Image: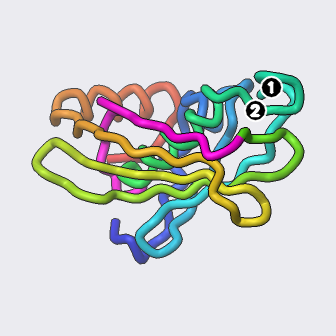
Amino acid sequence: MSTDEGIDPALREQYCFGCGRHNPLGFHLEFERDGGDVVARYAPRREDSGYPGLMHGGLATLLLDEAMGWAMYADRVFAVTARMSTRFRRPVTLESPLLVRGRIDRQRGRRIEVSAELYDEDGERIVEASGLFLRMDAEAEARSLEVMRREYGTTLD
C-alpha cells in the first residue's frame, strides 16, 4: 500500500490496547495518513489520570509509541519497539483533545528509526519521542497475521 492511499481498516481488527477495536478498555486510536505521516486524535479520559488533572506519563508515551508503530503498520510493515526515548516539554492535561503524529525517519535492513509528537488543541508540541523498531521476521509476522485472521476474522494477507 502506498503512502497516497488510506489505511486498511482490517488493521484495526485486533485487541491492541492503543488501537485495537476489540479491546473494551483501550484507546481505540484510528490513524489516518497525512502526507508521509500518520495522525490520530485522542480525547483524554478521567481514567487516564496520573496526578489530578494530568494524563499519566506512561499513557502519553503509549500514544507516541502507537504513532511510531502505525507509521510502519499503515504500510503493512510489522515491527516491534526496541528502544524509545521520550521528552516531555510540559504536562499533558486531561482537559483538551490531543493530536499525535508519527513518521518513519530512516530504514536500514530490519532497523527502522521513527519519531512522533503529541500536540495540544492549540497545536503546541507537548511531548516528543524517537524510537528504534525492529521489523519482524517472516515467520513471526505470519504467526501474528494468523492470530488476527483466526480470532478477529481479518482479511489481511
Give coordinates of residue 96: x percent, y percent: 85, 50
Q: Which amino acid lies under the numbered mark 2 shown in the image of this protein?
A: Met
Q: Nearer the viewer, residue 23 or 102?
A: 102
Front residue of this view, candidates 10 and 20: 20
Q: Is residue 140 above or below residue 126?
A: above
In the rendered image, residue 85 lying in the magenta stretch gets the answer yes
Spot the residue most to the left: 109
Residue 29 position (above or below residue 40): above
Label 2 sits on a secondary structure element that is loop
Crowding at dot 2, Cα within 10 Å, few <14 / some 14-19 / many 20+, comes out as: many
Q: Where's residue 18, x and y in %?
A: 59, 35
Which amino acid, by three-letter code, is at mark 1? Ser
Residue most extreme to the front? 89
Viewer-proximal residue among 81 and 24: 81
Secondary structure state at the residue bearing disc 1: loop
Residue at 84 percent across and 39 percent down: it is: 94
Q: Quadrant of the N terminus?
A: bottom left
Q: CA distance from mark 1 to mark 2?
A: 5 Å
Residue at (60, 53) in percent of width and height: 100
Q: Is residue 91 magenta?
A: no
Which residue corresponds to mark 1?
Answer: 49
User: Relative to residue 101, is residue 85 drawn left or right?
Assistant: left
106 w.r.t. 152: above or below: below
Dot 2 corresponds to which residue?
Answer: 55
Horizontally, is 154 left or right of 112 in the view?
Answer: right
Figure disc tally: 2
Magenta span of residues = 74-90
The residue drawn where x is 48% and y is 52% is 116
Q: Is residue 143 left or right of residue 148?
A: left
